[in-house]
Image: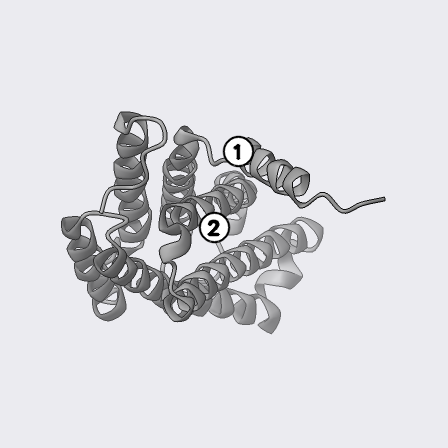
């Protein structure tokens, strides 16, 4: 059978057209922001910030914590869509170096978010099985300290790296306006160096994602069909 390059090219073009990112895909970033804010607020209200506290929240606020843990997977799925939206905006302008740091920091953030949620869920299950033994054990304090360090040190720093690389790509490719890139730099520095001084610094990243997603959504809807992202 003869090879028909024109038919294959037409099929590839049709496939790319069918898989085209919908204009409303940026809603995923807004959904991620809302879900992550809900998770952080629920945990902030229910769980004391001191990792050395004796664990009274396990008996008094376990339902709120369980709700927050169950929201995390949905927030993670929405964040993956948000990364896809950003990469779609970049298109062929995507630089390999910055794209690697951007994509890697996003996945590291997501992995640590899931890890912390799984550890909290494990504490809830262990407390339900053996309440007295868990609170008096070194396992509880280890898990509590591990979750605290993951969220407040490593995960928070990855959000700063994600914002910096995204803002850098916005400056050099123009897939987002310069004011949004400057805002990303400022908020990233605030997260990297001021997270210990600002009690509610965890809201910075989801709010930045919400602002970025809102801009992309409005730009996608207002742009005529067939016109690429503004530069």
- Nearer the camera: disc 2 or disc 1: 1
Please give the name of the residue rendered at 29% of the width and 60% of the height, measured from the top-left corner.
169
Question: Residue 206's spot in the image, x, y percent?
Answer: 33, 47
Neighbour tally class for label 1: few under 14, some 14-19, many 20 plus, Cα within 10 Å: few
Numbered tag placed on residue 44 in the rendering: none
Q: How many marks?
A: 2
Please give the name of the residue rendered at 50% of the width and 48% of the height, measured from the top-left corner.
80
Q: Farthest residue to the front: give it.
A: 2
Question: Residue 86's spot in the image, x, y percent?
Answer: 38, 48
Please give the name of the residue rendered at 20% of the width and 55% of the height, measured from the top-left corner.
181
Neighbour tally class for label 2: few under 14, some 14-19, many 20 plus, Cα within 10 Å: some
Please give the name of the residue rendered at 85% of the width and 44% of the height, measured from the top-left corner.
1
The residues bearing labels 2 and 1 have C-alpha atoms spaced at a distance of 51 Å
Residue at numbered disc 1: 17
Please, what secondary structure does the residue beneath circle 2 have?
Answer: helix
Residue at numbered disc 2: 57
């Amino acid at each position: 059978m003869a090879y028909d390059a024109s038919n294959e090219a037409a099929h590839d073009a049709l496939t790319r057209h069918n898989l085209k990112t919908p204009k409303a895909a940026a809603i995923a970033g807004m959904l991620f922001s809302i879900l992550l804010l809900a998770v952080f607020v629920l945990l902030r209200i229910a769980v004391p910030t001191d990792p050395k506290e004796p664990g009274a929240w396990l008996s008094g606020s376990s339902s709120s914590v369980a709700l927050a843990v169950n929201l995390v997977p949905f927030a993670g799925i929405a964040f993956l869509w948000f990364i896809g939206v950003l990469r779609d905006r970049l298109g062929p302008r995507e630089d390999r170096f910055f794209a690697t740091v951007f994509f890697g920091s996003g996945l590291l953030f997501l992995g640590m978010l899931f890890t912390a949620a799984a550890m909290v869920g494990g504490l809830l299950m262990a407390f339900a099985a053996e309440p007295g033994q868990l609170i008096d054990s070194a396992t509880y304090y280890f898990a509590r300290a591990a979750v605290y360090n993951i969220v407040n040190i490593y995960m928070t720093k990855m959000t700063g790296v994600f914002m910096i690389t995204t803002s850098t790509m916005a400056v050099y490719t123009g897939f987002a306006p310069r004011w949004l890139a400057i805002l990303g730099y400022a908020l990233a520095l605030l997260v990297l160096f001021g997270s210990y001084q600002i009690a509610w610094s965890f809201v910075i990243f989801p709010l930045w994602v919400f602002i970025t997603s809102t801009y992309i959504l409005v730009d996608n809807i207002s742009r005529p069909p067939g016109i690429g992202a503004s530069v």
